[in-house]
Image: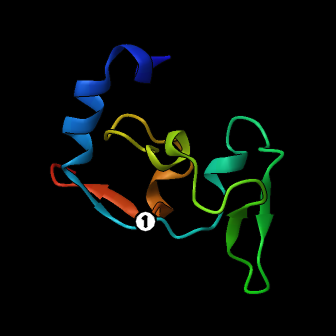
Amino acid sequence: MYYVFNKREIYTSLKRRQGNCLRCGRCCHASFKCQHLGYDENGLSLCKVYDRKPHMCSLYPYNESDYFYHLKPTCGYKYNDE
């Protein structure tokens, strides 16, 4: 819902995001288990429905407050002001 009403803020924040997705899949299970999450032969997460990560999924975390608390220390993404 936040994305629908605050796109400009989200894209401004994403410019400050550094790092990469580690493809661990933990964020895909943090609030509910994504039914489309799978893993490849190397144990890296992938979407079983789409060839590329869906747009909404690629936004996480869109700012320094968007992390699931228990995932923040090990997430591959960081923000300049952290």
User: Which of 79/7 is in front?
Assistant: 7
List x then y, in percent, for residue 29: 73, 47
Residue type at mark 1 is Gly
The residue under the point 52% across, 39% down is: 56
The residue under the point 46% across, 52% down is: 72
- Horizontal side of residue 41 vs 65, given as left or right: right
Q: Is residue 66 above or below residue 60?
A: above
List x then y, in percent, for residue 26: 66, 56
The residue under the point 42% across, 44% down is: 61
- Reading the image, the residue beneath label 1 is 76
- Horizontal side of residue 56 vs 79, given as left or right: right
- Horizontal side of residue 3 vs 18, given as left or right: right
Count of marks overlaid on the render: 1
- Horizontal side of residue 59 vs 50, given as left or right: left
10 Å neighbourhood of mark 1: few (<14), some, or many (≥20)?
some
Can you tell which quarter of the image residue 19 is in?
bottom left
| Residue lying at the far front of the rendered structure | 51
The residue under the point 42% across, 24% down is: 3
List x then y, in percent, for residue 24: 63, 67
